[in-house]
Amino acid sequence: MTLDQVPLGGKVKITAIESPSLVLQAMRLGVGPGAVVTVQRIIGGGPIIVRRQGGLFAVGRPLAQKMTVSFDCDQQ
């Protein structure tokens, strides 16, 4: 499952990102592999708004489509 497929309110752990350059982009946003995020808002065909450790981050749809996630997020 990818981040763009997570329903509103879903809490997931980012397990992988498709390419090294996208990993760097995600890490700049604070949502790299291992991060646990909660989907706060889904803006039509646009970005996915996620919450991580009290902060809100907008993840563009193309990046969200390349982020593999898991609902197994008991680590954090």
Image (cartoon, grey):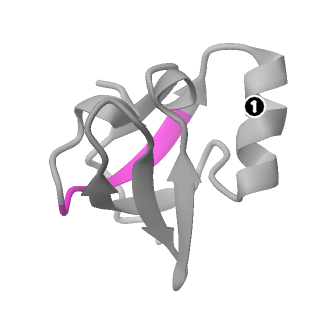
| 12 w.r.t. 70: above or below | below
The residue depicted at 56 percent of the width and 62 percent of the height is 57
Q: What residue do we see at 54% from left, 45% from top? A: 59
Q: Position of residue 5 (x, y in %)?
A: 24, 31
In this image, 16 relative to 19: left or right?
left
Q: Nearer the viewer, residue 71 or 45?
A: 45
Rendered location of residue 33, percent (x, y): 63, 42
Q: Is residue 12 magenta?
A: yes
Instruction: Please tell me whether mark 1 sits on a helix, a strand or a loop.
Output: helix
* 69 over 32 or under it: above or below: above
Which residue is more in the foreground, 2 or 33?
2
Residue segment shown in magenta: 9-15
Q: Residue flagged by tag 1: what amino acid is it?
A: Val
- Residue lying at 32% horizontally and 29% vertically, measured from the top left: 45
Residue for badge 1: 23
By secondary structure, the bulk of the magenta-drawn segment is best described as strand
